[in-house]
Amino acid sequence: GISAPLSLSAEFEGSFAYLTVRDRLPTILTKVIDTLHRNKDNFFKEYGKEGVQAEKTAISFLSRLRNELQTDKPVLSLTDNAEDSEAWNEYMRRQQDLMEDGRPVSWFKSPWLYMECYMYRRIQEALYMNPPMDKFDVFKEGKTQSYFESQQAIKTLCTYLQELITNMENMTEIQLRDSFLKLLQISLWGNKCDLSISAGQDNSQKSSPIDSLPDLQRFILVDDSSMVWSTLVAAQGAGSSGKKHARVDIILDNAGFELITDLVLADFLVSAGLAKQIRFHGKSIPWFVSDVTKQDFEWTIMQTMAANHKWMSASGVQWKHFMKEGTWSYHDHIFWTLPHEFCDMAVDAADLYSTLQGSDLILFKGDLNYRKLTGDRKWEHTVPFDQALRGFQPAPLCSLRTLKADVQVGLQPGQAEKLSSQEPDWMTNGRYAVVQFSSPCRE
Ligand code: F6P
Ligand code: MG
């Protein structure tokens, strides 16, 4: 393919990748083990002795995994014969071929993106191998808790949405555009609330998501949101029968407050007639601590419906309705929980790629998606976003991402240097963000 710089890796000592593999990943594994321990009584109640035995075996599997990681052991193939196991093992062979002098693929020597994804997949292996543990989501408690800790912010946001919808009929085009841009930014900053950067520590939304927008503006390093707006406006007239039928795909990231901001944005798009169809894409296994699974998605809508707050429950009821009538739909695909860069999608998940080609706008939420868009490589900061995508252009797309990893492209000359001199950890402290757009027809 098109040539690209090296992958970020823990092999670069002192790098963020290195610190993650050394410190954050073992912490996350330890928490997973604790969670299984704490739920012992529940496993017993539900499945009796068999449940307790499964829990024990899973725990010893996970302790071994933690040890393999900490002692930089070669990566092992998956043995659970799941739908995606062969794809993982194939990817391992591919990585092996890339290793210099036949060194084995291992935690501290191989690409960080691959190793981090692999850890989450191995956690799942521990559960798959130990039914009835295989349906258990080890991150569920954390996700639920962070949803409840963001209650106030959720109420504020739902109230704001319902007010917007009430006033929508009288809005001018400019007002509609401004409201869209606000909700896009709220969804962007919603990405601050992930639980993997904090290794599972509380990271919920406490302040008002609307009042804080002006102060946050200066932390947006690249802001292509006006192109997102023009894409939506252009797509509205694009129906073959002259009908408006724009379809937006949202590649979700985290559950909790971030998911609410995505649902609110999606509601606005439909209510304002900017989109006819929204397709949400989530993960098919628990992933990166807080990522959305189908269960989280459904749970969130149910909880919001049942809330003891007029506008929150009104929002939830509307969302349930959108799902029921098919205006909204939820999809998952194993590709989202494979370690591949997105430029591999056209070949390695051709069905998903061609589905995405039918979209008028794809929104990619969050840091991990950004890493996969850009291949998690040591790009120069001034390399154009389009170039870093290396041919991944199924449809107009936009990344909404707060920076939590050492990769950032598409900056102005000097911009990165200036940031580095003021705030050396600007790429990983989660205070900065980008709204980066790319379109197949733009050149
Ligand atoms: O390094 C921080 C981290 O754990 C990354 O591994 C990952 O890219 C990110 O957090 C997850 O963030 P997000 O939920 O935005 O994808
Ligand atoms: Mg995430």
Image (spheres, rainbow, N blue to C red):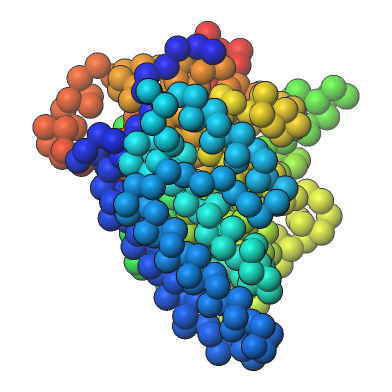
**Looking at this rendering, what residue extends furthest in the left direction?**
421
Q: Nearer the viewer, residue 18 or 97?
A: 97
Hey, which residue is sitting farthest front in the picture? 102
Q: Residue at x 66, y 29 (%)?
A: 348
Q: Nearer the viewer, residue 267 or 17?
A: 17
Left or right: residue 354 versus residue 167 is: right
Q: Nearer the viewer, residue 119 or 434?
A: 119
Q: Residue at x 56, y 77 (%)?
A: 55
* Residue found farthest to the top: 443
Task: Please tell me whether residue 189 is drawn above or below residue 382 in the rendered image.
Answer: below
Spot occupied by residue 15 in the image (x, y as percentages of width and height): 24, 38
Residue shown at 37% from the left, 23% from the top: 101
Q: Determine the residue located farthest toward the right in the rendered image.
A: 241
- The residue at the point 49 percent across, 24 percent down is 97
Q: Is residue 87 above or below residue 55?
A: above
Image quadrant holding the N terminus, namely top right
In front of the other: 14 or 438: 14
- Residue 412, given in percent of the width and then of the height, sits at 28, 19
Task: Name which quarter of the figure residue 245 lies in.
Answer: top right
Please tell me how many numbered marks the rendered image carries: 0
Q: Position of residue 108 (x, y in %)?
A: 33, 41
**Quick check: can you spot residue 215?**
no
Q: Is residue 29 visible?
A: yes
Q: Position of residue 194 (x, y in %)?
A: 42, 56
